[in-house]
Every structure is written in structure tokens, then in C-alpha cells.
Amino acid sequence: MHASHRTLIPSLLTLLCLSVIQSPSLQAADAEPPVITPGKSASPSPQSPPSDAIILFDGKDLSKWRKPDGTDAGWRVDNGCAEVNGTGDIFTRQEFGAVQLHVEWATPAEVKGDGQGRGNSGIYLMGRYEIQVLDCYQNKTYPNGQTAAFYGNNAPLVNACRKPGELQTYDIIFHPPQPVSGGASKPGSFTVLHNGVLVQDHIPVEGSPTTAAPLKGVVPAGPLMLQDHGNPVRYSNVWIRRL
Ligand code: MG
């Protein structure tokens, strides 16, 4: 072997390994999505559930939700909404794999903080793959961390945010990664509409999530999680259909 190959090949191997083990940059070079104005929403709720949906939150109680230790979810329920109140993330008691999910949410009407500190929460499919909830109405942050981003992975196609305090909708179609022979996995996918506008168009979901480091490998199902990020974000009208 030529002397330069003996040094070049190990270097290339090192580079390859580094690129595999590094998690995607949260400051990735995604272009900033254009800001658009979504269509007007119906009142009070843009979309009532279909007959075959599992109702996860109808504005009255959080009986379908738990804390990590299995005890009752502690978020405040008031005026048809469940509000983040510093008692921690909440998880559905049921587990889900491939789903269609509808969630309504609102960031605080009283605007505080900026960047990732303004109205931050999140919707974690299977407790591990986050569609970001954030107030990005006239608030800039890194594209793959903004509202409707597949957090840390993919920026939304557009910024379709309503104003702080207004109810917004996510309609999410999620397929989990699938195991294939040899311990590998076939990517799943996210398709997301924000306020009726396509923002994630069949984006691949890899087997090892980037935002929940201890959760490795491919699993068939997991609980839906709503994130307590310390900001009083409200949720309403949450329903899901198994696919
Ligand atoms: Mg979040």
C-alpha cells in the first residue's frame, strides 16, 4: 500500500465515524422558512373529531394522561384547555404507533422571552419524535427548531403561525421507523399541516431519535407526550386515529 494511503484511509474512516455519531446540528443551515398568513379558523374549534377517533382531550379532563410515574397528569384544566404549569411532561396512558393526530394549542397571549424561550412546548410522537410547539409569530430562532419543525431534523416549509394567544392546529400523520433484518431500520415519516398548511411533506423519521438520547433503537409504539418547557402553553381538542 502506498504510504499516503496508509494515512489517508484511517483519516477517512475517522471522518466517516464522526459524521455517523454526531447528532444533527440544531443550528443547521436550513433556509429560514417564508412567513405566510394561514386561513381564518372556525370558532370555537376548527375541526371536531371523526367518529372513529380516540379522544385524548376534549377540554374537560386529563384522565387519558399521566405523569412519567403513572400518577395523574398535573396540568391545569380551565376554560376548555389544559395548560402547562410546571408539573412536568404528560404522557398518554395508551401507546400508539402509526397515527393521524389532531392537536389544538395556543402560546401565551402575554408575550415573554424570545427565541426558544417564547411559548415553547412540543408534541412527541411515541414519546421521542418532537414536532415543535413555539411562538414564532415575529420571533426568530433556528429553522429546525421553530414552530412545526421536526425538532433538530427538519424546518417547516413555511411559517404559518397565528398570533400568540390564538388557537392553532396541527394535523400530523406519523409512521414509525420499522425494523428490517440484520438489526437495521427502515425510516418512518412525518407529514404535518399547521393551521391547514402543509409544513412537513413526508419527511423521513430515523430509528434513533435525536432529542431523546437515552431512547435508542426501533420500537413499535409509545405514548404521545406533551412537553412542559416551563411556558404556559395551552392545549385543546386532542384526538388520534390509529393507522
Ligand atoms: Mg419544544
Image (tube, helix red, strand yellow):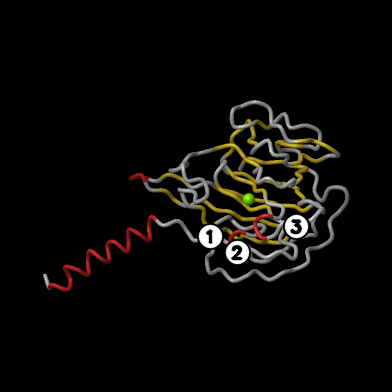
Three-letter amino acid code at disc 1? Leu
**CB under 8 Å between callouts 3 and 1?**
no
Mark toward the viewer: 3 or 1: 1
**Image position of 6 (left or right of 241):** left
CA separation, marks 1 and 2? Answer: 7 Å
Q: Residues within 10 Å of mark 1 (few under 14, many from 20)?
A: some
Is 215 drawn above or below residue 107 in the view shown?
Answer: above
CA separation, marks 3 and 1? Answer: 25 Å
**Image position of 154 (left or right of 92):** left
Three-letter amino acid code at disc 3? Asn
List the residue tagged with mark 1: 26
Of 224 and 231, nearer the camera is 231
Q: Secondary structure at mark 1?
A: loop
Give the position of the C terminus as an image quadrant.
Answer: top right
Expressed as whole percent of the image width and height from the top left, the position of residue 215 reads 47, 42
Mark toward the viewer: 3 or 2: 2
Of 155 and 230, nearer the camera is 230
Three-letter amino acid code at disc 2? Tyr
Expressed as whole percent of the image width and height from the top left, the position of residue 54 reads 70, 36
**CB under 8 Å between callouts 3 and 2?**
no
**CB under 8 Å between callouts 1 and 2?**
yes
Expressed as whole percent of the image width and height from the top left, the position of residue 151 reads 58, 55
Q: Secondary structure at mark 2?
A: loop
| Quadrant of res 154 | bottom right
List the residue tagged with mark 2: 142
Is 45 drawn above or below residue 80 in the view shown?
Answer: below
Of 224 and 202, nearer the camera is 224
List the residue tagged with mark 3: 195
Of 77 and 173, nearer the camera is 77
Mark 3 or mark 2, which has the lower sequence index? 2
CB at disc 1 and ligand 1 closer than 8 Å: no
Mark 3 or mark 1, which has the lower sequence index? 1
